[in-house]
Image (cartoon, rainbow, N blue to C red):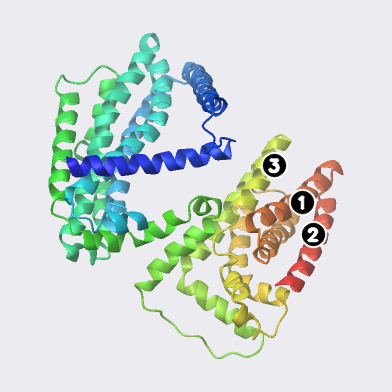
Amino acid sequence: MRDVQSLFWLRWRQFKDTAVYWLRVLGYRPQDASLSQNLYVLYLVLIGIFWLYTVSAFVYDTAGGIGKLLAVSTAAELMVGFTYVVLGVQIYVMINALQSTPLKLSFADMAYVAGAPISRAAPVIVGFLRQVGIRLIVLNIPVIVFGLVMGRTLLPKEFGEAALRLVATVIPLIVLTWAFGWMVGLSRLISPRLGRLRYLWFVPLILVPIAYFLPDVALWPGRIAVLVMLNASPVWALPLLVVLALVAVGVTFWMGDRINMIHAVDESILYARIQALGLLAWRMIDVQARIRMQSRQVTRKPFLSLPRAQGTSTFVTRAALSYVRHPFMLLTCLIWGAAMTGFGVEIITRQLPLQVWILWVVAAGIAPPFGLLHVFRSDSQELFLRQFLPVDGLQLLLADILIPLLAMILGGWVVWFAYGFEADILSIGIIFIPLLALMVALAGAVAATNTKVLQTRLLATGLSFGAVILAGTQLHTPIAGLAVAGVAVLLMSGLVGQNA
């Protein structure tokens, strides 16, 4: 327990450092120990409590209002769906544990914890309690909302108590699920041979056909939660979940004393690299995705080779080979193009307000498709190699993005044709989608040649797409939007040609 106390103290110090960082963002000065600074922290805490109270009251009233409008048959179907969601979460936890150990160590942990003369069970206990505590907070928020909506429909006289009963059942269910996941993941650190079985993570997927043919075998945890919420469960149901959760936690701690910390360090390298990025890992998702792709590429042998080519076709074939070796990037471009086209069509057809358009444009700027500029970014950022490429920036961009751009356009066209518009509207979309896709690529390329990547990408995307939207809506003709899009493409093409 002394080792566990030491690690908890370390985590508390780290939490305090993180809290001070965010308080400094909000104007707090930790060097100033005056009364005014302490009062300012109290003011921030009171503001946070008031915000939580108002949001909770709003969610409570909204959930009750939705529950009034929901049909009983629909609520019953959603309750059945809840049992499948529980199974899906359990499968996800086991797959994730089989792919990588749940005991995540940062670079600081590797330096000060992994090699320290402490019990091996201590970091497992602290890591498990920390992870489960976060999951209990995060996952119970949607569970409370779901319980309020379903309770208002099925048990209108006691829907608050029904939601509390659901939460009381979900708490040991979450503990049991993550404890079992940790048991599976720690087995990789006890027996390293399991970690070398690349496709072992497919095993939990066997629960899917079992849930279809034998639902009582696979869906019983979610069904217990539903029955407890409806106050129709056997007396032993909830105690059974609690006992199983406690046993699973005990087995997890017992297994933690038998792990090999060397393998824990090896499997935590990817997590440590992403964790070291801090907020950058979430501000720039492409950086995080690039790190994950590099870690997978290290363990694989490259397949195929660069074909013989001359001139501009050399760049096209090189980029194509890179995307063939990483087809996931093409798939993300295809899905991104389809999703953004679908959202755009819904905004237009339903005549949603300007705020929704702004949200759509911001999403295009913050989260462009990963993989669209993967090769171009490598070519433009490697200055030593760039000087030997005898093409300007625009030619290099077009050669590098040709394949993923076609995938993104194809995804948009599929969704556009699926709506079944008339011929004149259909032809406008056929022209608009490639032009807008090229605008996304050019905005990202302009940002890639600037030191302030995120700010430049948001600015370029907002100005170009905003001008197109305003021209199309204010002049009441898509031709105006096409003309503005063409001008935006020419301007950004010039910037890329000069700077890349």
Disc 3 to disc 2, how far (Cα)? 18 Å
Determine contact: label 2, label 1, CB under 8 Å.
yes
Q: To which residue does mark 1 refer?
A: 463
Give the residue type at disc 3: Ile
Q: To which residue does mark 2 refer?
A: 488
N-terminal of the pair, mark 2 or mark 1, is: 1
415 and 448: which one is in front?
448
Residue 142 placement: quadrant? top left
Give the residue type at disc 1: Leu
359 and 414: which one is in front?
359
What's the residue at 25%, 51% (across, down)?
204
Image x and y of residue 452, in percent: 66, 58
Q: To which residue does mark 3 refer?
A: 358
Image x and y of residue 27, in percent: 59, 36
N-terminal of the pair, mark 3 or mark 2, is: 3
Residue 173 appears in view: yes
Whether residue 66 sits left or right of residue 128 in the image: it is right
